[in-house]
Image: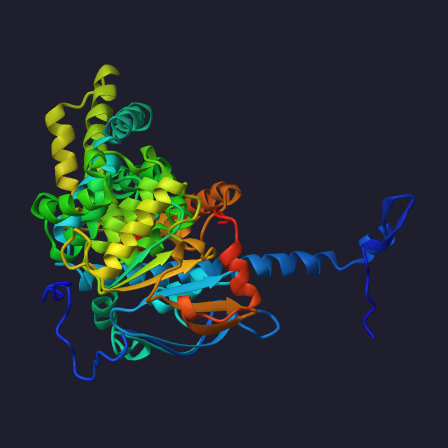
Amino acid sequence: MKPPAPATATPADPAGETDAALIELRDVAVGARAPAGRFLIEAVDWSVARDEFWLVAGLPGCGKSLLLQTAAGLLPPGRGSLRLCGREVAALSETEFAGVRRRIGFVFPDGGRLFNDLTVAQNVGLPLCYQRDCSLDAVAEPVGELLEWAGLAAFANAEPSRLGRSFRQRAAAARALALEPEVLFLDNPLSGLDAGQSRWWLNAIEQLAGGRAAIRHGPSTLIVAVDDLRPWRGPGRQLALIQENRWRRLGDLATAGDEPLLRELLAKPAASG
Amino acid sequence: MVPTFSPVDKGRANGRRLVNLPAVLESALPRSYTDAAGRWLLDAAATARQILAFALITLGVMATRFRRARATVRPLIAAQIARSGIRLLPMVGFLAVALGFVVIGQMVALLSHVGAQNLVGMVMVTTVVRELGPLVTALVVLLRVGAATVIELGTARALGEVEALEALGIDPIHYLVVPRVVGLAIATATLTVYFILATVFSGYLFAFVQDVPLTPGEYFSQIALALRWEDFVLLALKSLSFGGIVAIVSSFQGLARPLQLTEVSRATTNAVVASTLACVALDALFIVVYLLM
């Protein structure tokens, strides 16, 4: 059983916030508008409820990363309505938006975009130090716990550039979990990883989704962008496909229909980037 | 109907491109020059407007987040002061001594030869305290730190670190730009004081070596008498502003857009040129203030 989210991670719920959908996109257009007037992805109608596990699949370059960044509030939608934690983003003040954003974690692909001038521990502790206005020593306990979870305790004082890509990405995941987000976005977490590292990630994500991860207040809602569906087969996973500038919800992965793109993604060789 | 000229023919002969020389000679060259100058001016105005907007945003963030995340931002400010202040002290000291020897010492000697020793203090205050001190120090900071700032921030932007900060709920301006602006402003102001002191002392040393009939007491009392309280206020304002300008322009050039490797040199040059022009323009404003005093 997953423990309830702490009061520090969740700002006082303002009037109008509902728990019906943590993330809601209505007729959203993603990416820059092409000269022909079309966006990269058109008409996304997507609602993510608490405790759901979503897979967003598509071929490389179809706009999965942009869709995830838009849904996480990192990019403004080209058109349409985006609601985060039950609140319309366009109507939020800067302070309110920052509060909502802290409830959403994001792990970037290909090394996780760590800050190379900080050590691994400083990277993981940075969001805590910044939001709580304290030194790294004051957050040593949660940082140590996250590093332990990521298997990086031995590399706490190492520079990220000295770590391999898979370990850097683990550190990025630990950093994203530091603020105890309710939703975690993972952009192609298995990209370029070997079988052993992929197993660690699949296991870690499975534990996070099931509320069994050895960290306090892990996110219960996960959204993962993938371009190879084979490792992600399993029950209780919602699937959405991006194909030909359109977003489509296919429902549970285990019962998803039989269509060409799905067959291709389920038969695709690994490490396609 | 206005005839159209094509200085370069579209067609090719024997694989070589033909240049239509008569068309080149008949083309409206002066108009082309004015077009080019106009475009340059419009580009410069657009860049100035963007830098001004960036500066206002930075000042806004400094004001609204003054008390936020001090435990994180203060060490970053200290690092900037160490980097652009303490580490530049030897270089600034060397330049100050050289300037004192080469320019100020000779000027003191010359004034003494023509019997105008009583003007030494005024000349020192006008040249060193008001003008050379802040400007030379700002240029040293610009060349040593401003250029590096463009590369650092340009790389951070290219590696997606700005988006990573936003994903962690950290304001990139607050984390990346504010420490640089505050650190460079403090460092430039402090270095300017050291620069002026070193120049004044080395200037007298050169005059002493040349047997100028001016005692240390006369020399320093003249300078002290020539200084007014406004000089201290304006010196602080000027040097702080110069440091802030260098930091803001360098940060803008680094963060304005993701830099490709080939664009780094151009962005760095742009930062140096724009910072220099901005500092000189501000210096001109201060001259007006001095003249009105």
In percent of width and height, residue A193 lies at 41, 43
Q: Which residue is rendered at x = 40% and y = 42% of the image?
A: A195
Vertical relation: A133 (above or below) A81: above
Name the quarter where the N terminus of chain B is drawn: bottom right
* Image-based side of A28 in relation to B98, left or right: right
Vertical relation: B200 (above or below) A225: above
In percent of width and height, residue A13 lies at 15, 76
In this orientation, which residue lies closer to the viewer: B62 or A194?
A194
* Image-based side of B52 in relation to B260, left or right: left
In this orientation, which residue lies closer to the viewer: A57 or A153?
A57
Instruction: Classify residue A156 by image quadrant.
Output: top left
In percent of width and height, residue A80 lies at 42, 80
Name the quarter where the C terminus of chain B is drawn: bottom left
Instruction: Classify residue A216 by image quadrant.
Output: bottom left
In this orientation, which residue lies closer to the viewer: A15 or A177?
A177
Residue A196 at least partly seen: yes
Q: Which residue is rendered at x = 10% and y = 44% of the image?
A: A140
In percent of width and height, residue B45 lies at 47, 61
* Image-based side of B204 in relation to A273, left or right: left
Instruction: Classify residue B11 by image quadrant.
Output: bottom right
Residue sitting at the far left? A138
Q: Which residue is rendered at x = 25% and y = 69% of the image?
A: A51
* Image-based side of B8 in relation to B124, left or right: right
In this orientation, which residue lies closer to the viewer: B30 or B87?
B87
Vertical relation: A250 (above or below) B106: below
Q: Which residue is rendered at x = 49% and y = 58% of the image?
A: A266
